Amino acid sequence: MKISFSSLLCFILLSSAGAFAEPLKVGFVYLSPAQDAGWTYAHEKARLYVEKELGDKIQTTFIENVNEGSDAERVIHKLASSGYSLIFTTSFGFMNPTFKVAQRFKNIKFEHATGYKTASNMGVYNARPYQGRYLTGLIAGKMTRTNVVGYIATFPIPEVIRGINAFTKGLKETNPDAVVKVVWISSWYDPAKERVAAETLILQGADILSTHADSPTTVQTAEAKGVYAFGYHSDMSKYGKHAQLTAVVHNWGQLYLNEVKSVLNNTWKPENLWYGLKEGVTQLSAFNKAVPKEVQDLVNTRKEQIIKGEKRVFDGPVYNQAGELVVKKDNTISDSDLLTMNWYIQGIEGTLPGH
């Protein structure tokens, strides 16, 4: 085969360009400190996992302790104007700032966690921790002695309400006499508020605690007060080896790796990803030895049923707090309704803020 000089030169130039291609710059925006437990820690573990898997093909950075609102918009804008081609923003309150910056930087790709706004260059992704919450509710129902279980909530948005309802659904299945008491702290991360809320719930008779907040404070407080608790976002057993029964864990690593690879391969597209137990994004950590084997077996059975699609968390009958039937037997709640959930299930004490 005869090759022209111009074709050979073109091949050499293209090969050289590929050999010296700059790494893809990927930025992460965190609400709270990238410490060793909690929501932000789960994202930080995923960032490090992607770095390990892709090596010098990428260059990553993260900015922590970013307040939701104008501060977030400033930080995201700075990353976008500094050569970052893919930016992950990891808190619900970052949604509008991310969307605004995405409109100004159409050539940059954005991924937002737990939101619902998308654009041609902005996708969203979420986990289904409510599936794990349901499983921990099963445990709570079997192990509570006071029939009072405490729940520390952050903001009354569908994501948080889903978790409370799913937890209560599991609780009532294994213990119809048990109730859930909720304390709202109006913050994603505030260890002082979390501690006060945990202590308040214990004073109200709760012998098991669950939380949606970012720090391990709830587990630490449970350990100090001699009650049980469930970790959230990551395994928090190091903060309460006796207290933590298990934890609902987010494993973002493979999801992040897939998204970064799609940018490298020029196959990225904005999507609305919602992954759970089946995909391994939602997981349970190891059981505390205090959890009886028959309870562990029940939880593992239910988990496999959810993974196989044989069971959904909100299969009917489901009643709201007022005792009204909202999901009939043999029906379930659709994803679209889960994404807008704004009501309490039966078995929760107190009033949902704003309702």
Image (cartoon, grey):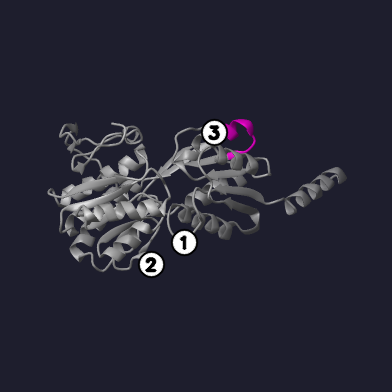
Q: Give amino acid for label 1.
A: Asp
Secondary structure at badge 2 equals helix
> 141 and 67: which one is in front?
67
Q: Give amino acid for label 2.
A: Lys
Tell me if mark 2 has few (under 14), some (14-19) or many (20+) residues whose alpha carbon lies within 10 angstroms of its own.
Answer: some
Verify CB contact (< 8 Å) between mark 1 and mark 2: yes
Q: Which mark is residue 326?
A: none
Quarter residue 78 falls in: top right
| Tally of numbered tags | 3
Tell which tag, 3 or 2, sits nearer the viewer: 2
Residue 109, position as x, y percentages in the image:
59, 39
According to the picture, the residue beneath numbered tag 3 turns out to be 99
Verify CB contact (< 8 Å) between mark 3 and mark 1: no
Residue 53, position as x, y percentages in the image:
56, 58
Cα separation, mark 3 vs mark 1, equals 29 Å
According to the picture, the residue beneath numbered tag 1 turns out to be 36
> 202 and 250: which one is in front?
202
Verify CB contact (< 8 Å) between mark 3 and mark 2: no
Task: Residue 313: say if magenta.
Answer: no
Residue 195, position as x, y percentages in the image:
35, 55
Q: Which mark is residue 238?
A: 2
Task: Residue 106: say if magenta.
Answer: yes
Q: Give amino acid for label 3.
A: Phe
Q: Which residues are magenta?
A: 99-109
